[in-house]
Amino acid sequence: MTLQQLRYLIAIAEYGSINAAAYNLYASQSNLSTAIRDLERELKINIFKRSNRGVTLTSEGTELLGYARQVVEQVNMLENRYTKGDAGRMRLAVSAQHYAFSVQAFVDVIQQCNTDDYEFVMRETSTGQIIDDVGSFRSEIGILFVDDFNKRVLHKAFEDASLTFHPLFDAQIHVFVGESHPLASHEVVEPEELEPWPYLTFEQGSYNSFYFSEEPLSYLPHRRLIRVSDRGTITSLLTHHNGYLLSTGVLSDEMQTGIVSIPLNTDKRMRVGYLIHKERKPGYLLQSYIKRLSDIVRNNPNVQAYLGD
């Protein structure tokens, strides 16, 4: 087993195909294919499932990828420290549900970073992908919510991926609607008042399950359903269409104009927190990001910051 093989493995998993990985690494496709075949032969496992659409990791490949990331990350730190004579390249990768506060904290950490050698990655993605990213060491941290409905399934997924969940805050469920929406003037919205209006939800891809939904109360029936993958489209739909979104009540900067947040009359609560792999030792940037997350939510009047263990 060589470092080059592990680097090829990581690149192929990142890009989803051997062709794309070879193109971005300025290497030949045959070299990457041979390296992976040799690695599979040596370890006596199948790392990738191959199809006309590219490659996907097997369960054994996913486990190997986690180890490969740790090895390559440590080697890169050693190389940077002793060949460049500095502290090495700083890196922070975040995978999160579509929360403005997680992006705000990410930007704040970048602005406070005082080194010229760094890599920052922000992925707003599906719940299942967040768990995969943190479990495979693709991201240092993941941000998502749990509640009474999904916690049994999600905590089992966390345990299977060797992840720990750290609560950040509890929040009452709020309804996001545009200022011209008929519900916009209500001080509180009753659940039955939502039934006539289009329900907006974030796409979960292959993890499309009520338990992996980014929105609370996803199991309720919805006659009109609109799925999207980004906050920009959600914002446009809220301001130009009579749909609604259920979330924490924390409005992002781009949603401050034209959108209102109204409490939903329910005793159900959302608990938002972050995931970290049990084997990961938080570095300086990750610690700074977690602290900034805590500072932001602690100062937000719409949530109750979680101060427990």
Image (cartoon, rainbow, N blue to C red):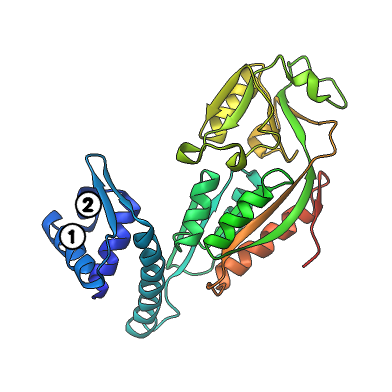
Quadrant showing the N terminus: bottom left
Tell me the residue at 81%/43% (across/down): 302
Name the amino acid, label 2.
Ile
Q: How many marks?
A: 2
The quadrant where residue 307 appears: bottom right
**Left or right: where 97 falls relative to 115:** right
Q: Secondary structure at mark 2?
A: helix
C-alpha separation, residue under disc 2 versus residue under disc 1: 7 Å
**Left or right: where 199 falls relative to 15:** right
Tell me the residue at 72%/57% (across/down): 168
Q: Are the two marked residues, 2 and 1, in contact with CB atoms closer than 8 angstroms?
A: yes
Point out which mark residue 307 bears.
none
- Residue closer to the observer: 70 or 253: 70
Find residue 269 and report its horizontal and vertical position in percent: 79, 43
Quadrant showing the C terminus: bottom right
Q: Residue 282, relative to residue 200: is it above or below?
A: below
Residue carrying label 2: 18
Q: Is residue 111 visible?
A: no
